[in-house]
């Protein structure tokens, strides 16, 4: 058995030696004397210029505007003259009530309530009423709305309407905090 092993080892060595052949391995390539190698730095990433986007609202619906107003504008294109396309222009001045006025500011404002109980905030130059009126003054307790009426002679004449906050007679007395007295 020992002989069998030795024979198989000798046969394996003979195959390896014959496969290598008698040729010497090629010499390594000559190293050229060059300047010291520079560190290769990673290339800076190229930044692709972002695409500039600009929004063009032409032909698009305003998301903050009521679609009911778009319907009224559509009627105007069919030949009907619409003086105003704001929500308060749907009501007559008699159908609106002044609920509150804030006048101690450089930009006073008020609130008008329609007959369905919905409140609308107004500022100076807000359009109000079917006659195409405009808020011209906001006073301490009143709002002045000026509309223009065309007279018989064809000239437009201003018509000022003053709407005031209604004072309820049966209101509860108010405590004045400065002097501690009840006031009506």
Image: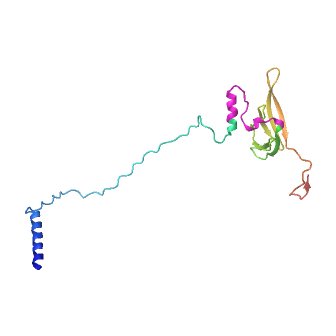
Residue at 9% of width from left, 74% of height from top? 7
For the record, the magenta segment spans: 70-94
Residue at 84% of width from left, 35% of height from top? 161
Residue at 81% of width from left, 46% of height from top? 100
Horizontal placement of 130 versus 52: left or right?
right
* Vertical comparison of 101 with 176: above or below: above
Residue at 69% of width from left, 29% of height from top? 76
Furthest-left residue in this view: 22
Horizontal placement of 81 versus 29: left or right?
right
Furthest-bottom residue in this view: 2
Residue 84: name its quadrant: top right
User: How many numbered discs?
Assistant: 0
* Vertical comparison of 100 with 182: above or below: above
Between 179 and 91, the one lying in front of the other is: 91
Horizontal placement of 177 versus 84: left or right?
right
* Vertical comparison of 10 with 31: above or below: below
Between 122 and 40, the one lying in front of the other is: 122
Furthest-front residue in this view: 1
In percent of width and height, residue 15 lies at 11, 66
Magenta stretch: residue 85 in it? yes
């Amino acid at each position: 058995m020992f002989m069998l092993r030795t024979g198989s080892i000798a046969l394996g060595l003979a195959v390896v030696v014959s496969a290598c052949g008698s040729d010497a391995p090629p010499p390594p390539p000559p190293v050229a004397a060059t300047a010291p190698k520079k560190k290769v730095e990673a290339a800076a990433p190229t930044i692709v210029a972002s695409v500039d986007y600009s929004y063009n609202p032409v032909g698009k619906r305003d998301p903050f505007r009521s679609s009911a107003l778009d319907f009224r504008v559509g009627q105007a294109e069919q030949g009907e003259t619409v003086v105003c396309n704001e929500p308060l222009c749907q009501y007559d001045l008699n159908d609106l009530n002044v609920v509150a006025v804030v006048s101690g500011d450089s930009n006073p404002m008020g609130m008008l309530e329609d007959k369905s109980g919905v409140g609308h905030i107004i500022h100076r130059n807000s359009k109000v009423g079917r006659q195409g009126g405009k808020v011209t003054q906001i006073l301490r307790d009143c709002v002045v709305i000026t509309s223009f009426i065309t007279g018989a002679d064809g000239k437009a004449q201003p018509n000022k309407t003053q709407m005031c906050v209604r004072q309820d007679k049966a209101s509860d007395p108010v405590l004045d905090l400065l002097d501690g007295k009840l006031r009506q």
